[in-house]
Amino acid sequence: MFGKYKMHPNSGVNPPYAPAYPLEWECPLRTLEVVTRVERSKVEALLADTPFDLVNDRVAFRFMLSPGHTLALHAGAMFDLMVTVPVRCEGLFTQTHIFMYCTDPMGIAAGREIFGYTKKDATHRFEEGTDGSVEGWVRRRGTPLADFRFTPDDGAPLVRLVDGDEQPAGEIHVRRVPHPERPEPVYADVVYRRTPLEYSPPRPGRVTMTLHPSEFDPIAALEPEILGAHFMVSDVYGGGFAVEDRRLLKRLIP
């Protein structure tokens, strides 16, 4: 961690004399969201070992650039690809990321260990044109995962992750710790978080998105049908005890 934030006493995964990362961070956020339809049984199979109830058959592919992210100041930005579905659990109308890729090792470690994210490592390209277009790609260890190109078009349909004014809020995941002796979890729980966001009105447009088959990252196997795409910006985005709603909802194991 190279940013201004400090560790809270006894808050790291590593011992106090070797802290790994803080729980506070901030940055703006620039998001290209591609909303798709996926055969419901495919997503239900991915959620089979969770207590989450799937809301519909939509899956959002969110290409997210965080310039000046305080966990990744050395790189200038952090990038995430979130593959997200709406769910309900414990009275919450929220969402979970069935696949997630991140360009920053600290962001990967913190997200997995603290919140149970499905984060894996990736590299990216995310270029914005003066006309509002966005194009880029996501690769993992040299293997292409996704290519995308978005062109704004105010006449294009605006499709959200769910129909209606209320959209899923926050994120929910099952966090697991592997057993040191056997191939099973030694501990598992359900964690919820809601970070502050103040998105601009979504600007719709036309998008092309190509997902590449990969044995180890089977996002192409979802075979998504694109319903719409839009671009949004938030100058408010961050994490930490002072700004987030963070909850450990229930323990599953033991």
Image (cartoon, grey):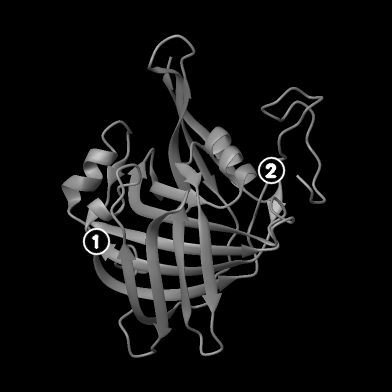
Q: Residue at position x 28%, y 64% from top? A: 36
| Viewer-side residue, 184 vs 197 | 184
Q: Quadrant of the C terminus?
A: top left
The answer to which of 83 and 87 lies nearer the viewer is 83
Residue beneath disc 2? 241
User: Which residue appears at 69% of the width and 43% of the height?
Assistant: 241
Q: Residue 74: x, y in percent?
A: 74, 55
Neighbour tally class for label 2: few under 14, some 14-19, many 20 plus, Cα within 10 Å:
few
Give the quarter of the image for residue 90.
top left
Question: Is any atom of residue 119 visible in this view?
Answer: yes
Considering only vertical position in the picture, is 243 above or below 160? above
Helix, strand or loop at mark 1: loop
Rendering quarter of residue 181:
top left
Residue 62: where, in percent of width, then height?
Answer: 43, 62
User: Which percent across, then down, holds residue 168?
Assistant: 40, 56
Q: In this picture, is 32 found above or below 87?
A: below
